[in-house]
Amino acid sequence: MNSKSIQKYCTFYLDKYYFGIEVEKVQEIIKYQQITSVSLAPLVIKGLINLRGQIVTAVDLRCLLELPEREEGESPMNIVVRTEQGAFSLLVDRIGDVLELSNDCFESPPDNLKGMSRTLIRRAYKLDCALLLTMEVDKIVSADVLNSISVAA
Amino acid sequence: MDDDILNEFLVESREGLDQLDVDFVVLENNPQDKDTLASVFRTIHTIKGTCGFFGLTALEKITHAGENLLVMLRDGVMVLDESTTSLLLEMVDAVREQLETIAETGSEKTGDYHSIVNRLEQTTLECTMRAANKNTQSNNDPCADSDNMNHVEVDTEYSADGDTESVALDDEMMEVVKEFLQESNENLDQVDSELVELEEDPENRDLISSIFRSIHTIKGTCGFFAFSNLEKVTHVGESLLVKLRDGECRMTEDIASALLGMVDAVRAMLDEISENGSDGKNGYSKLISTLVELVENGVLQRIEDKNTDSADAKLNANSAESLDEGVIVPSDKVPPGVSESILDGKASTEPQNQKAIAKPETELGRKKIPANVVEASIRVDVPVLDSLMNLVGELVLARNQIGELVGTHENTQVIAATQRLNLITSELQEAVMQTRMQPIHSVWAKLPRVVRDLSRSCGKKIRVEMEGKSTELDKSLIEAMKDPLTHLVRNSVDHGIEQPEERIAAGKPEEGVLTLRAFHEGGQVHIEISDDGKGINTDRIKQKAIDNGLITIDHASTMTEKDICRLIFLPGLSTAEQVTNISGRGVGMDVVKTNIERINGTIDLDTKQGRGSIFKIKVPLTLAIVPALIVSTASQRFAIPQVNLIELLRIDEEDQENAIEYIQECPVYRLRGRLLPLVHLGNELRMDSQREGVLNIVVLQSEKNRYGLIVEHINDTQEIVVKPLTDALKNISVFSGATIMGDGRVALILDPHGIGHRAGVLGDNRNNDLAMQPGNDINNSGNRQTLLLVRTDDGGRLAIQLDKVARLEQFEKECIEYAGSSEVVQYRGQILPLVPVCEILEERRDVARHNQENTDKESAAPIQVVVFGKEGCQVGLVVGEIVDIVNESIKVRSKSSRHGVLETATIQGKVTELLDVSIFLQRSESLAEAAREVA
């Protein structure tokens, strides 16, 4: 097995899917925080949270990936990521493990993926238990992506 | 070439050049100003020295020639006149151009610099000739890299002169010297450590260059002050550095020691200067000869180093003694040959010597330096200040939080401690803000040059006066103010101030004055740019604005002078008859306004025809922490910056019915006789807000428009720390940022301008808004007015202000006679021309059909005529039917699309057009004229 390049992923769950983002981008994981919603903002932006004096924009990944809304009473987790655009918080259902994956057990996602999923999902790792879909953080938080959903919606 | 060093050089030089621009203009007005001359000299010299280092020959030649000319000025051989100033400014430009080329391409622009060099040399030469005739000796090239020994000798002869000169330093000069000392001391400390580093890492060109520059700056300046001993020492040191730089010799311990020795010597002399005003009598000949030796035999010597380990102890002692005791050994008494032979022998032991000697000297020296010279200021990186500012911002937030927690506390000690914390935080905030403050002078500095060049190119004479140069504002604001200020100044020079002939003809002094004023008031910085020029021709602006379709004629007639003036801030309006290369394209003022508004500032102007205009800019002191009003709607809190806040209104539930009126769906409130459009914050933000209970209205000012923002609750005022929003949120114009409240939650900061735009109460229907300005609004006088309602031929309702109406008359059809093509009637012993409404108002119906209808009516009933005007020149407006006379306040609805109609309003619940009487009278005047002639 070729193990020359190994990537660590921070994994999380959204609906029935299993996702991962590069672990280097993750600053911290925090529980659900009070969110100040921003009216007129793109739908995917749930609002702003105060992370020890720093204002962090919270992005709902369910909304971004066009998954059904979280059920009433289920509070999401925040994955705070560092990006070129500053800090963002990604709202996810549940946090998984950090996985070390070698770069030879993934395939590109199928071409018939639609919408944002197609833009954002980079790799599909074939794990024993499930498929891990990985995304690039900088792509997720780019203004284009965030705004495109609001237009579609 | 090392990019970092080069960039640093470019940045430094550009700053230097900006300063030069100012200095030259000052000098021209006051050629005896030694401070400024010194500053100019130093700047040019530094640039010259550094480009020598980079091997930028063209630049070096230019600056060298310029420097020579400056030496003439310095020595009083010649006095600065206009042509010389121009020449020197040209040189500055040439240097700047070269720098730009270097920045872009990394190499110099060759060619076309010879002309400026030649002219500079020519001028210098002429001076020298003149000077020579007067038998004055002038040292016109203090830093040519000629033969070193010779140079030293020549300089020594000078030292006597130099000493007397420096003793005679006057107070003014002393200031400059002080500055120089402080700067040099800083430089020397750095050189010290750099030399040590260099010894470890001899190949480091960054270091060499930095040392080189420091030494060179000191050398250049002391040349100016005629500290000849100091100059000598630094000169040889510099020569040695040149060798190092060129790779002709490598850094060795000896060289390092010798250079450190030089640094110590320089420091000692600086101390001397700070105490006595002269660089002392110690010629440091030993040190100089050591250095000279190293310069000449650097390579050779290294080989000898290894061979001649046995040092000449006697020589050591000698040299130590001579330096230690400060024995004067004038270098001209030491023949070059001798010094060389001595040095050959003792070179290897020199280091120890130098170190041993240097130590006591420096320690002693340091004690002597007065504290105020050394550490009156320190340089801090801007990022450090920024992070400090951020931390203070956090502290302010934390204080707010604690304040909120303690609010209900009963322990007095806790309360007292909180109050102390409060106080300290405020003071800290102020102090930190102070560190970011810069005098406005740093932006103004380049303006005199701009004015000078511009005025010369348009053949005008303009003097710049500045008041409140030291007024301080935040660094980021200073940056933002740069362009708008330059633009306004350009405008004043180009359009404001007249040609000298015009000015004389107008009874004004030939020389125009452009005044820049800055002062603090009400927590804001006020900046005023005024000129005593011809002022702004409001008629022309009006005409232009109408031509460009920015306003309509009817509208223009209702505008005040001031409002018309403000039109120049609209995009696309320029009153300049000619578009010059300086200004007049009609984009400038718009940009100025936008730029100023971006930093939460405002701009206004006043003008008096023939007397000049004044632009008034107000900007906040800082952007990071602003006082704000906290309001809430739909259980969310929002902050509104207080700059935009005018007043707060509270309307009780029972009064709401009457107080809030609606024009269609748009709520308005009568605020002291003016209609204030209201905006529901909840609606604008698409939030569910309650509508019952007390109504809270926040009256906001955005640009020149006011509107009322309806919020659910008004909480309190607070200092908030503005944090930017992420890119994806930046295009939501209603928010300008976010902040963290006392309870740790995030609140959004509302942008009054953005909300107004979104709600449509400003911006697009600008004309409408202008109409609602006080003094603009025809309904303003007493709010209610009496109107005559008539029906026009096409069935529409028309309102006429009753006070403009002379009489209402009824004429039988038979009475109508014809004068030429126009209808007239005999009326009270005169001929009254009749004008049908359709001639004034552009009817939308087709004319033939209309005429048909008209004749039908005429046959049936007598005609109704509204008579306007005074006895003798009256005119009658033929209307379809006189409906009513009402006393009502007009709720302005919109502009009329028709010519001749002032506006459309709802009167008695029906849409009614308001006749523009002035236009009617104008139009009918020609008819009246024609009618009388016939009569």
Image (cartoon, grey):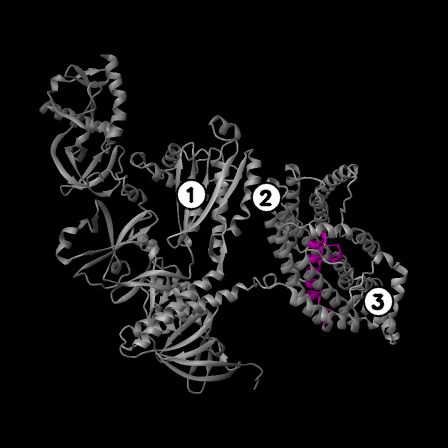
Q: Quadrant of the C terminus of chain B?
A: top left
Looking at marks 1 and 2 on the same chain, the residue that comes earlier in the sequence is marked by 2
Q: Is residue B352 magenta?
A: no
x%, y% of residue B132?
Answer: 79, 39
What chain letter is assigned to the residue under label 3? B
| Secondary structure mostly seen in the magenta stretch | helix
Looking at marks 2 and 3 on the same chain, the residue that comes earlier in the sequence is marked by 2
Is residue B935 depicted above or below B132 in this figure? Answer: above
What chain letter is assigned to the residue under label 2? B
x%, y% of residue B899?
Answer: 27, 33
The answer, for residue B345, to whether it is visible in the render is: yes
Q: Which residues are magenta?
A: B201-230
Dot 3: element: helix
Which quadrant would residue A135 be assigned to in this image? bottom left
What residue does disc 3 label? Answer: B299
Labels 3 and 1 within one chain = yes
What residue does disc 2 label? Answer: B26
In this orientation, which residue lies closer to the viewer: B655 or B349? B349
In this orientation, which residue lies closer to the viewer: A140 or B366? B366
Is residue A46 depicted above or below B143 in this figure? Answer: below
What chain letter is assigned to the residue under label 1? B
Indicate which label's residue lies in the foreground, 2 or 3. 2
The answer, for residue A115, to whether it is visible in the render is: no
What residue does disc 1 label? Answer: B615
Residue with the most extreme top position: B935
x%, y% of residue B925?
Answer: 26, 22
Going by the numbered disc 2, the residue's amino acid type is Val
Question: Label 1 to label 2, Cα distance in Å?
Answer: 25 Å
Q: How many marks?
A: 3
Q: Tell me: B263 left or right of A32.
A: right
Q: Residues within 10 Å of mark 2 (few under 14, many from 20)?
A: some
